[in-house]
Structure formats: C-alpha cells, structure tokens
Image (spheres, helix red, strand yellow):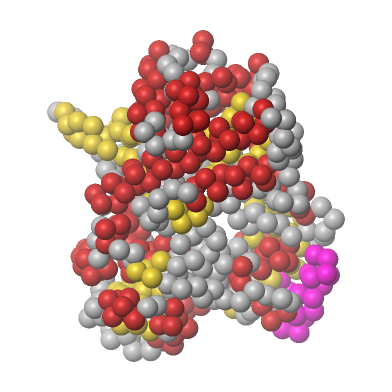
C-alpha cells in the first residue's frame, strides 16, 4: 500500500469512531526517543524514518511536524504523498496543538493515550477545550496496521555491580531519600532509562538501546518491577526479588487503578503516558504531586565506578575508530569502490572486536559530501553514495559497552578540499574548543554555556538547527538528560555528569561538518568566589589536522588541541594494530 492508501484506511477508522482528527506521535508506552518496531506507527503511516516527528491526519489533509535536524530528509521522504511538512520552530509554523485548535474547533481529536505523553495530552486537551473541541483516548492505528511487528520480549539480565557501581537496593534508598525531600513517597518510572537504571536490568528490546521494556513503581513500603519473569534467569529473579515485587509487564494499568494505600505520588507529566496519568487522577487512594523524575537527576551524575568504566570504554572505542580509519584509507588507496554503507559495516565490525562491546549505540551516520548536510542522514544497503578522494566524510557513531556508552563525530578529509570547506571546518573546531575549555561556577545552568560554541559561527551570520550537546547514559541511552547544551535547557551542571560537545555547520547541497567529543564535568578549584568546575574530554580520537586553517586559530586553541592529541596518542598507542600506529603518530603530531 502507498502512504496515501494507508492514510485512507485510517480515515475510514476515524469515520467509524466519529473522530475528526487523529494524532500519531513518535512514541511508545515508555515515552522513548528510540522505540521498538512494534510502536513505529508514525513511520509506518507517513514513510518518514527520522527519530522525531508527529503525524496529524484530519478529514481534509495530513501533516508531519519535525525539527530542523530532519527538514531535508523529511521533504524527500514525504514527496509523492499528501502529507504536508510543518517545520517546527520556524517562523509562522504552528505547533501541533495550535494547528488542531485552529482547524478542529468543535470537533473530536483522538490520540492513543497508552503511548501519548501526559504532558502533551494535557496541553492538547486544554487548547481543544478552549475552542469547544474534545480529546479522546482511542487506539485507531494498531488494529489496522498490517504486518505489525511483535512486541519486544528479548532475554533480560541484571548488570553486574562491578559495572553499575550500585545495587538496585542502594539505588532505591537514594530514590526514597529524594522523594522525601519533595514531600512524596511514591513514583512511577515509565521511561526505560529510569526504570532500567533503578533495577540494573538490561535487554535488547530496542535497537542500539540495551533496555528491557519495563516499569518500576516505587511505593512507601515496597517497590514493584513490571517485567515478565520468563525473560529472566532463575538467579536474576531471586536477586531482583531481594528488592522488588515482580509483576507481569501488562499489570501496570490494573495496579495504577487499584489500592495504592494513600500514596503521595510524585508525577512527571513528561515521563508518563496520558492514560496512566488519567488512571492515577481517578484513583482516590493516591494524592498527586507534580515534579520531575528523581531518578533522572540521580543517574545524570555518574558514580565513581561508572566514571572509571566510561573512561575505559572510550579507550577501546578510540582504538576501534583508529583501526577502522586506517583500513578504510587502505581500501581507498587500492582503488576499491567503497560506499557510505560500507563505512557503517566496517566501523561496526571494528567495535565488535573490542572488549565488552555490545553493539552500536545508534544507527551510524556516514554522510559523504552533500549527504552530510542532513544531520541525521543514514545510508542503507540499497541507497548509499560512493566515496571519492575529495571533500569531506562525516561519521557520527557510537558504541555500547558493558563499561559505558559512547558517541563521537569526526569530519574526515578524503582528499582535496575547498578554501570554503577548510574555513568552515575551522570555525566548527573553534566552536568545539571554546566550549570544551569553559570554566564556570558551581551551579551554572547548562543552557548558559551553549552560546560559547555558537558565538564562533554566529559572528559570521551562521548557526545550526540543533542543540550543542546532550547527556549520555551509562550502558543505556545515547541521549539521556537532564543535562543538555541547548538554549532551551536550564539544568544545573554537576561534577560527574557526562555530556557531548558537538557544534556543526550544514550547507545544504554542499557539505556538513561536525566535531563531537563526550566530556566529563569535573571540579577545577575553589576561590574566594566559590567552587569552579570545568570539563575534560572522554572521547579519544584525533581531529583531522589537514582541514584546519591554523591562521584562524588562537594560541590558546592550538595549545588545547595539541594537548588533547597528546592525550589521545598516549591512550591509544599501546592498543592499536601495528598498521594503525604510524597513522596515529602523524594524526596526533602538534600543530
């Protein structure tokens, strides 16, 4: 079926249910960014494969909302369908809620409340009520999705404390202390990063994310883990039962509607489904206090064991990248035909050789030339451009290790580059270094530092349509808060946090440039003005010296880069393959 034919089927279901508009988010019951195939309805009914977007279907038209990372990609993938692209946060473009309030006044809008974030549901409900419209929770999509993949049910296991640093029982004690500080004694953890961090459970339910689809409900006198026991070994079941009451995964709705003993429930509207919030709101054995997930803040600061492991993971990740790059160059020099997809396969194979590797942390972005201008471009075996010995190749990739999660981007010189490419590469590098060198008082908000990177491109009238960096989980999600380098973020940077630094420039139809390292927030020094923090690089891989216009760099920037390259060489040299060592020596030579 074509996309338009699939939309026609949905319109037929809407008519049967007396619904005037249908909203299909990119979501699952756990509000995940990366979701299992069984819940990728937005992709199925729009044809758009990006990781973020909302599809709206009315009786008259349909539209897809997505952000600046995906404008180019979405425009191409929606071509030929009736779906109109709404470029989020662009001037004059309404939000989903504004659009529905304007076009569906007095009508009925449907969402699947089991997968719709409560925060979005409440906002949409409020806007619709103001224009005499109503919001209903009804699943009109899954019943007509032909060939829908099965729900995830991969083997689950408990991550050893030698990796996690703390047992579930120790983490639960921390959670209860934080809940008490917020005058609460209960909280439901629906998001998989929170639920899996608290239980130390891992699985492979989502591509690139080592998560088990599960919930954790913390109550005053018990904690419940909603995970089917047939997924666990007898040993892990016994271990988990020391901390949790194990409940079937699908028992969550029943339990939220049952007697919860007067629980003072702290509810994060963005981290719970609309349906589950409605259950709690109707439950007279619960009193609700609104606030953030306390686990999000706890796991955002890595413990000493996690940090030690993360540093080791980045050594092996750098070794894999270095060995890969030398092998790619060798194939190019031999005149072989190599395409972008080959790059992804080669790099994954090198990571797989590393100790305790458990695959990639996201779908590798390997964009050659103009393709790199699409921030989240992904080549496939069927559609992939051939590399040439000129211009830039951008590779954004990462690995999952029992010792941590990595995320790194490098823009490689494949051969002769233009003066314009060299200048823009250097501008991006200066942006990266200026943020990396930042020192700041304890308590500084992460969003305040975003401009340190952007200033280096703003002064030329340039910018990039994404944040400058994001938090990273521990053997978890590659995007995990609360920390972010974004103009919209206001979280506090704390010692032990890990965060990426990834400014870029994206010239449509020409090239894309990004330089990304993961950083660790560390203590710097204390003065009469208080405690000051700084950041140290975790990522260990050279930045391509051939693309740098040295005359544009300050001495301080050059000193930082040279010191970083010395650190990279010292860490990787003892472990790389013999053929790689000579390349590494040259790549890390001081400028």
Q: Reply above or below: 322 against 132.
A: above
**Residue depicted at 44% across the width and 53% down the height:** 357
- Residues 135 and 12: in front is 12
- Residues 456 and 215: in front is 215
**Residue depicted at 31% across the width and 39% down the height:** 521
Q: Reply above or below: 347 against 591.
A: below
Q: Reply above or below: 359 against 151.
A: above
Membership of 19 in magenta stretch: yes
Question: Which quadrant, please, contains the C terminus?
Answer: top left
Relative image position of residue 377 (x, y in whole percent)? 66, 45
Question: Which quadrant, please, contains the N terminus?
Answer: bottom right
Relative image position of residue 510 (x, y in whole percent)? 72, 30
Membership of 422 in magenta stretch: no
Residue 504 seen by the camera: no
**Residue depicted at 23% across the width and 70% down the height:** 169
Segment tinted magenta in the rendering? 1-21
Relative image position of residue 16 (x, y in whole percent)? 76, 84
Would residue 180 be found to the left or right of residue 129 on screen?
A: left
Overall secondary structure of the magenta section: helix
**Residue depicted at 25% across the width and 52% down the height:** 305
Relative image position of residue 51 (x, y in whole percent)? 60, 55
Q: Reply above or below: 209 against 89.
A: below
């Amino acid at each position: 079926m074509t996309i338009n034919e699939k939309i026609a089927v949905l319109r037929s279901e809407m008519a049967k249910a007396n619904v005037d508009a249908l909203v299909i988010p990119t979501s699952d019951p756990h509000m995940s960014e990366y979701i299992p195939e069984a819940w990728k309805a937005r992709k199925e009914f729009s044809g758009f494969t990006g990781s973020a977007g909302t599809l709206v279907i009315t009786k008259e038209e349909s539209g897809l909302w997505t952000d600046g990372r995906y404008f180019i990609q979405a425009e191409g993938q929606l071509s030929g369908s009736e779906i109109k692209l709404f470029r989020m946060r662009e001037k004059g473009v309404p939000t989903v809620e504004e659009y529905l309030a304007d076009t569906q006044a007095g009508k009925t809008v449907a969402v699947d409340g089991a997968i719709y974030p409560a925060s979005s549901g409440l906002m949409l409900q409020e806007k619709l009520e103001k224009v005499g419209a109503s919001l209903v929770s009804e699943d009109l999509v899954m019943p007509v999705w032909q060939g829908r993949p099965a729900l995830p049910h991969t083997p689950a296991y408990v991550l050893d404390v030698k990796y996690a640093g703390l047992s579930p029982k120790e983490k639960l004690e921390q959670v209860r202390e934080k809940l008490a500080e917020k005058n609460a004694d209960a909280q439901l953890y629906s998001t998989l990063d929170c639920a899996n961090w608290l239980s130390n459970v891992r699985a492979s339910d989502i591509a690139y994310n080592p998560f088990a689809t599960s919930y954790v409900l913390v109550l005053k006198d018990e904690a419940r883990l909603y995970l089917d026991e047939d997924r666990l070994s007898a040993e892990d079941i016994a271990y988990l039962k020391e901390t949790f009451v194990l409940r079937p995964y699908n028992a969550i709705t029943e339990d939220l509607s049952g007697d919860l003993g007067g629980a003072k429930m702290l509810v994060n509207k963005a981290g719970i489904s609309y349906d589950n919030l409605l259950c709690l709101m109707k439950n007279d054995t619960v009193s609700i206090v609104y606030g953030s997930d306390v686990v999000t803040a706890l796991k955002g600061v890595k413990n000493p064991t996690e940090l030690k492991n993360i540093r080791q993971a980045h050594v092996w990740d750098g070794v894999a990248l270095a060995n890969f790059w030398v092998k790619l160059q060798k194939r190019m020099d031999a005149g072989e035909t190599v395409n972008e997809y080959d790059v992804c396969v080669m790099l994954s194979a090198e990571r797989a050789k590393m100790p305790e590797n458990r695959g990639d942390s996201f779908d590798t972005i390997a964009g050659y030339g103009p393709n790199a201008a699409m921030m989240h471009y992904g080549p496939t075996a069927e559609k992939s451009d051939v590399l040439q010995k000129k211009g830039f190749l951008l590779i954004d990739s990462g690995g999952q290790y029992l010792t941590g999660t990595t995320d790194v981007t490098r823009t490689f010189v494949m051969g002769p580059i233009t003066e314009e490419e060299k200048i823009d590469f250097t501008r991006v590098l200066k942006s990266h270094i200026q943020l990396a060198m930042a020192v700041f008082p304890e308590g500084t908000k992460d969003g305040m530092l975003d401009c340190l990177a952007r200033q280096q491109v703003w002064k030329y009238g340039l910018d990039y349509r994404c944040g400058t960096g994001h938090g990273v989980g521990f053997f978890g999600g590659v995007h995990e808060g609360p920390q972010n380098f974004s103009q919209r973020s206001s979280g506090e940077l704390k010692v032990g946090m890990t965060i990426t630094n990834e400014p870029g420039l994206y010239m449509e139809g020409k090239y894309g440039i990004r330089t990304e390292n993961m950083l660790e927030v560390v203590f710097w020094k204390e003065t009469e003005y208080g405690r000051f923090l700084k950041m140290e690089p975790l990522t260990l891989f050279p930045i391509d010296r051939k693309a740098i216009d040295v005359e544009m760099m300050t001495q301080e920037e050059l000193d930082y880069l040279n010191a970083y390259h010395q650190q990279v060489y010292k860490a990787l040299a003892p472990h790389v393959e013999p053929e790689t060592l000579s390349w590494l020596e040259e790549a890390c030579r001081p400028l």
